[in-house]
Image: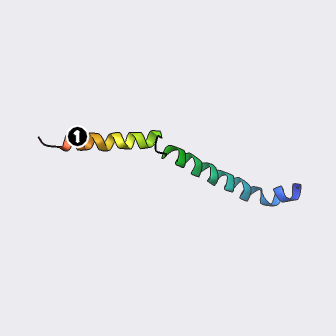
């Protein structure tokens, strides 16, 4: 087991970092996530201010 971690520790750490990054991005872009809400509010305000009555 020690030999496996000595030889492949960089690959294992990289794989976990990529998986964690994908999880964070998926969480932020979820339907009820903070980034999604801010983007929807931004687009709504843009169309509201751009409409000419």
Q: Residue at x 78, y 60 (%)?
A: 8
Place residue 10 in its image quadrant: bottom right
Q: Residue at x 41, y 40 (%)?
A: 37
In this picture the colour scheme is rainbow
Measured from the top left, where is residue 24 in percent x and y? 56, 46
Pick the front one: 4 or 24: 24
Pick the front one: 4 or 27: 27
Measured from the top left, where is residue 23 in percent x and y? 59, 48
Q: Quadrant of the C terminus?
A: top left
Report which residue position mark 1 lands on.
48
- What is the tally of numbered marks visible in this picture? 1
Measured from the top left, where is residue 1 in percent x and y? 88, 56
Q: Residue furthest front?
A: 31
In the image: residue 39, left or right of residue 27: left
Tell me: residue 11, above or below residue 28.
Answer: below
In the image: residue 30, left or right of residue 49: right
**Circle 1: element type:** helix
Q: Residue at x 81, y 60 (%)?
A: 7
In the image: residue 50, left or right of residue 2: left
In the image: residue 47, left or right of residue 38: left
Measured from the top left, where is residue 34 in percent x and y? 46, 39
Place residue 14 in its image quadrant: bottom right
Q: Residue at x 21, y 40 (%)?
A: 49
């Amino acid at each position: 087991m020690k030999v496996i971690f000595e030889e492949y520790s960089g690959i294992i750490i990289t794989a976990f970092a990529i998986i964690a990054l994908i999880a964070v991005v998926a969480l932020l872009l979820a339907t009820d996530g903070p980034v999604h809400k801010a983007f929807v509010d931004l687009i709504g305000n843009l169309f509201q201010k751009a409409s000419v009555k």
